[in-house]
Structures are given as structure tokens and as C-alpha cells.
Image (spheres, rainbow, N blue to C red):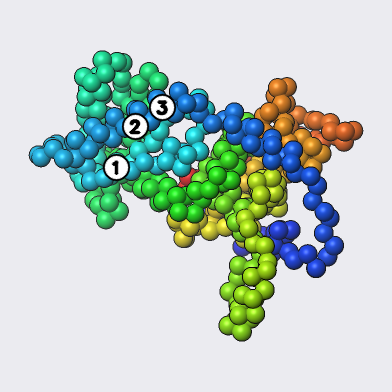
Amino acid sequence: MGYHPRFKRPLPFDPYLVKDHYFPRVPEGDDASVTQALLTRNTALTPTKTEAAAIEQMVTKVKKILETIMNTPKSNIDIHEVQEVGSYKKDTMLTKSNSADLVVILKSLPTVELVMSLGQKIVDDLKAEQKEIFGCVSRPFGCEIAGTQAIVKLHITLFPSNIPLLEPDLHLPAIILQQNLAMIRHARWFTEYCNQLTSKVLIRCLKDMKRRAEGWEKFSVWHIELLSHYSIHQTLDRHPLPLSHAFKRFLQLLSTDRHPLPLSHAFKRFLQLLSTGILLPGSPSLSDPCEKMFTLNECYDDETADAICASAQTMLRVLCHGGINTILGNDPKGVDITTDISIWNGVIVTPLERVFDTEEKEEGNPKPVVQEQQQQQ
């Protein structure tokens, strides 16, 4: 699963978890420009009122139809529950991404025909109500209801206790249903722990960077959310202490500032965590709060983890030389700093070479072998 005990490292250095008196700390620069760049980019990435209204209207109508099916006696489709998930539920949608996600928990075992029957029923009811063009397309996760201005994706799943009853040649794959069920856990965790404006702004900007950055193509959005929360909220003095120490520390904390990090610091820390190799094999990475058996770095093969780390290191170097607008995509030149050499006030920043690669070198010397791993997200 990508865990290499022989490469196990100590904890990566995190300056935000080190007390000031251990060594002289270099004063932080003026981050007002970074904060402003993040807020400006967030505004540009937020769906317009027209887009938001179209998606909201589509979701409301689809949910209403699903509720009608749920309450219809002797329906051939037994629905237990419908949950909003994904970026629509978390309020981290990007502009021009006019799709929302719903998880539909069925009571009966789902076949492709059953799912398409559900989708077609929704399309027929939408057409009868609005006299507009709608369509249903089968997808690996379930089906997709498409209108002229918005799309609703239906992710089909079951109760966990019913998943062992699935027949591989007859029903939707168990792994797909488990992934769809995990989307509900992710949405609930996000709503409880990561529902602050700072988190949403940071996540929206990072999701946009994922679309543009070389090496971040396979970077899980769920992991971006977890690392963003960690970057903002995981600060000093969070470990349990003996009772006597805890009482003394409690008195100290009354006069200690333990607020979450500001947006600009959280953005920088996010890149620092990736740059120190928190997703590399053998690194003491974060645990998935919704999948207790897995750490984040177990979900990536060596090549993908290395690409994410290398791109973050290049971004961090550019950030240190004032290239925040280029990193975020605010620069109209559209330079890709993860693939192209860039110059900042006379400093040349060259994108790092990949350590792992599945292709052989031109001269015939093979690079390190990459083990194939199952993607958890």
C-alpha cells in the first residue's frame, strides 16, 4: 500500500509547532499582499449568482423528485436516504463547474438497469415540469442528470451491512459503493470541523491550483481539505499533559494566543508540509479521520507522491520571492512555474526534476521502480 518501513523518517520539521525560545525566529514578512491575492483569487473562483442559482434550482428539483419516490408506496425503487455531498455541500465549488453531488442510499441491491431507471424517472418528471431539455447518462458511480445549465450527479450506495450481498456480475462494484458511502463521512466531517470561511477560501484556491499545477493531477481533493484544516488549526500545545502540568499549562494558556493561523500563513504552511514530504513513502503522514486504518501517504504511488512534493517545493520557492499571483493564477501571462523556468528579482527558479519515473532514461539506465497502488480517493 505504499508504506516503506525501511524509509521511515522522523517527523518533518514544522516551524509552526516549534516554540520561539528554541532558536531565533526570522520575523515574518508583510503577508498583506499574500492575503489580498488569496481573497482576490477566491472571488474570481466563486460561482456567480446566476451559476449558484441554477445549481441550487436543479438540486432542489431533483431532491424533491427523489423524496416523492421515497414516499411512494410499492415503488420499484426503494430509497432510504438522500445526502448532499462534495463541493456543493461544503460550499467550495469553483466557477464554471456547474455540477452538484448527491449520494442516494438504496434499500435494494443496485444494478445498472435499476440506476438508469431511477435516472430516467427523474428526467421524465423534470421534463413534465419545466418543458426543457434534460438527459440521463450512466456513470461508474451511478448516473448523471444533465440540464442546460447544471448537472446533478447521483452517487449510488447501500448500507455497509448489505455490501457483502452484492454479486460482481449483476450489481454495481462494491468498491464504488464504498467510495460513495465515504463521501457522506467526508461531508459530515467537513461540516463539523472545517466549515470556517478561512478554510473554504484556502481550499477553493488550492483546488484551482490542482487543476493547473504539473504533478498535482492525482492529488486527492479530500486530502487537500484535510491538510488545509491541519495547516490552519494544528498549532502548539495540543498534546496531552500530566495532571499537574496540565493545570499549570491551563493557567499559562489563559494569556496565550492560540487562534488559528491567518490565511496567508496557512497557505504557506500547506506548501511547507507538502515540501517536507508529508505524502512521501515512509513519512509519518496524517491519518484519515474517516478511514482510521489509512494514512494519507498510503493512497499514492511513489511517482505521484514525489510529483506532488516537487511541485510544492517549486511553488514555495516562488512564493518566497513574491510570486504569489503567478502561483494562484492571477497573473494574465499564465506561466506554469511547475514546468517552466521563471525569474524573480534576478533569482532563477528551475522546476525540480522528478526522483521517481516509470519511464527509462534515454541512455538505458532505469530509474527507481514504482509499485502500482490502489487509489483510495
- Badge 2: few (under 14), some or many (20 or more) residues near its Cα, within 10 Å? many
**Residue, x 50% and y 26% (percent of image)?**
48
Query: What residue sits right under mark 2 in the picture?
Result: 59
Measured from the top left, where is residue 281 in percent x and y? 62, 54
Compared with 10, 88 (above or below) is: above
Q: Are marks 1 and 3 in contact (CB under 8 Å)?
A: no
**Which of the 4 image quadrants contains residue 105?**
top left
Residues at discs 1 and 2 in contact (Cβ within 8 Å):
no
105 vs 1, nearest the viewer: 105
Q: CA distance from mark 2 to mark 3?
A: 10 Å
Alpha-carbon distance for marks 1 and 2?
A: 11 Å
In the picture, the disc for residue 48 is: none
Q: Looking at the picture, how far across and down is residue 154, in whole percent?
A: 33, 35
Given residues 28 and 110, the one toward you in this image is 28
Q: Which amino acid lies under the numbered mark 2 shown in the image of this protein?
A: Val
* Closest to the observer, 96 or 171: 96
The residue under the point 61% across, 75% down is 250
Q: Amino acid at mark 3?
A: Ala
Q: Hey, which quadrant is residue 341 in on the image?
A: top right
Mark 2 or 3, nearer chain start? 3
Q: Quadrant of residue 259?
A: bottom right
Mark 3 element type: helix
Which is more foreground, mark 1 or mark 3?
3
Would residue 356 be found to the left or right of residue 27 on screen?
A: left
Disc 1 marks a residue whose amino acid type is Val
The residue beneath circle 3 is: 53
Q: Earlier in the sequence, mark 1 or mark 3?
A: 3
Residue 126 position within the rendered picture, expressed as x and y whole percent measured from the top left: 25, 23
Q: Which mark is residue 82?
A: 1
Mark 1 and mark 3: Cα distance apart in space: 21 Å
Q: Residue furthest bottom?
A: 244
- Label 3 crowd (10 A; few <14 / some 14-19 / many >=20): some
